[in-house]
Amino acid sequence: MSESCSISRRNFVAVSTALFAGATGSAAGTTNRFAELEARLARRDLKDIYKDDLPTPCMVVDQDIFESNLKKMADHCAKTGIHLRAHVKVHKSTEIARRQLALGAIGLTCATIAECELMSQAGLKSILLTRQPTSRNNIARTVALAKRDTTFGTVVDDPLAATWLQEAARSENVRLRTVVDVYAGLTRHGIEAGAPALDLARQVDTSKNLKLFGIMGYAGMAAHTHGFEERSQKSRSDLSGMLETVAAARSAGLPVEIITGGSTGTYNVDSEQKGLTELQAGSFVFMDTLYRQIGSKNNVGTFDDFGSALTVLSVVISKRHPGQCTIDAGNKALLKPTDEVKGRPDVKVVNQGAEYGLLVWKDGDRDLKLGERVEIYPSNLDMSTNVYDRYYVTRGDRVVDVWPIMGRSGAAQR
Ligand SMILES: Cc1ncc(COP(=O)(O)O)c(C=O)c1O
């Protein structure tokens, strides 16, 4: 980090001069710097913009690592025959979703109807809503989206919700793709495997305005199980009831086109076990520190199949005590003690305030200095990406692209 920091400091003078050349007078130049940066980003004029020019805290994507993660998953799917229906709740970005589809993903999975609408408005197809809609608002929007896009579908785990969806779809004269969500070890959703799930599949199949499309089993407890063997066993046992239900449904003549589930943690477990036809993995695009701890097939200590591509960029704002400093990313930036500091495994994130983060290190380790740039790997992508409005995509210290993070909060986004 010290080297990148000194490079960035040297760059700062040259870059600031280049970026803000043309500002009239030094005082005007100073006050107009941020406005000029925003204007340049808006017209995608990214020449000579560097990390040091960015307002902090902000989210930074390492383009090379990100692209390699996407390619690695695409290659894995092509080689093993499992499909990717990429979960977008992690990134909430049409730019990223579009790249995933271009690399062979067969569709997208979303946690909210707002995410589905955003992806669909961008022209992206084959979206599956993985959270059953039950409010009048969400049911109406689900049916409206199905009317605009026949490749869109939703999950259900309750006969009552299936009845509500059938009714809403009938009144709009829509046929809604419907996937039966079967319990797979995570108690937050999923109908009990066996007779209850089979009955629900039959109900969907005989509902005139619903089209039984497949079965989902999301083994969410397996995803973060530490150790490859333990994770494989957990996934196998958590998916077994759902897979028996699939077999029974097929024997009963019910159409089960897709068997969907899986996660980043189980991506190579699921492709080996041959139960699912598709993976809903999401986190692999960036990775977070909690996922890195679960260990991979070939590395017990670290799940390093995919690289850490996302950091929160912050700056040291106070350095008054030995062995510690304060940065400008705190609770509002969702800083956590399980976060890690890029290039400084010895530095710990210990506690924080709303706009302040505290970093500590042992006496004798290299100090972090006032004004120094610090990049933090977040612990949970879904939560952290939700509090920023854009990704600054970077190559080395240079900003090469800016992508909006959409559908995060506000009434229109729920
Ligand atoms: C329904 C569903 N599918 C798939 C995933 C997998 O995501 P990840 O690859 O980020 O673990 C999630 C994450 O929570 C999920 O809720």
Image (cartoon, rainbow, N blue to C red):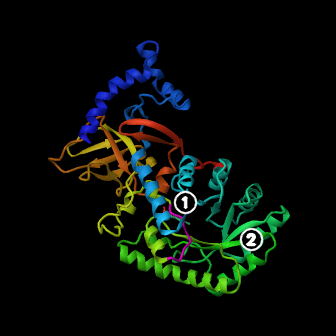
Task: Specify whether residue 159 is painted magenta.
Answer: no
Above/below status of 289 relative to 184: above
Inter-mark Cα distance, 1 to 2: 22 Å
Question: Label 1: few (<14), some or many (≥20) within 10 Å?
Answer: many
Numbered tag placed on residue 211 in the rendering: 2
Q: Quadrant of the N terminus?
A: top left
- The residues colored magenta run 274-281
Q: What amino acid does circle 2 point to?
A: Lys
Rendered location of residue 352, percent (x, y): 36, 49
Rendered location of residue 189, percent (x, y): 59, 73
Q: Decide which of 343, 255 is in the foreground and name it.
A: 255
Q: Decide which of 315, 91 is in the foreground and name it.
A: 91
Q: Secondary structure at mark 1?
A: strand
Which residue does the image show at 22% across and 50% down from the upper left?
Answer: 361
Numbered tag placed on residue 325 in the rendering: none
Between discs 1 and 2, the one toward the N terminus: 1
Can you name the residue that lies furthest to the left here? 364
Q: Is residue 122 left or right of residue 5?
A: right
Residue denoted by label 1: 86
Q: What amino acid does circle 1 point to?
A: Ala
Q: Is residue 9 left or right of residue 108?
A: left
Which residue does the image show at 62% across and 48% down from the upper left?
Answer: 410
By secondary structure, the bulk of the magenta-drawn segment is best described as loop
Q: Decide which of 160, 297 is in the foreground and name it.
A: 297
Q: Secondary structure at mark 2?
A: strand
Residue 145 falls in image quadrant: bottom right
Instruction: Determine if residue 62 is in view.
Output: no
Which residue does the image show at 62% across and 65% down from the upper left?
Answer: 131
Rendered location of residue 290, percent (x, y): 38, 61
Question: Label 2: few (<14), some or many (≥20) within 10 Å?
Answer: some
Rendered location of residue 367, percent (x, y): 21, 42
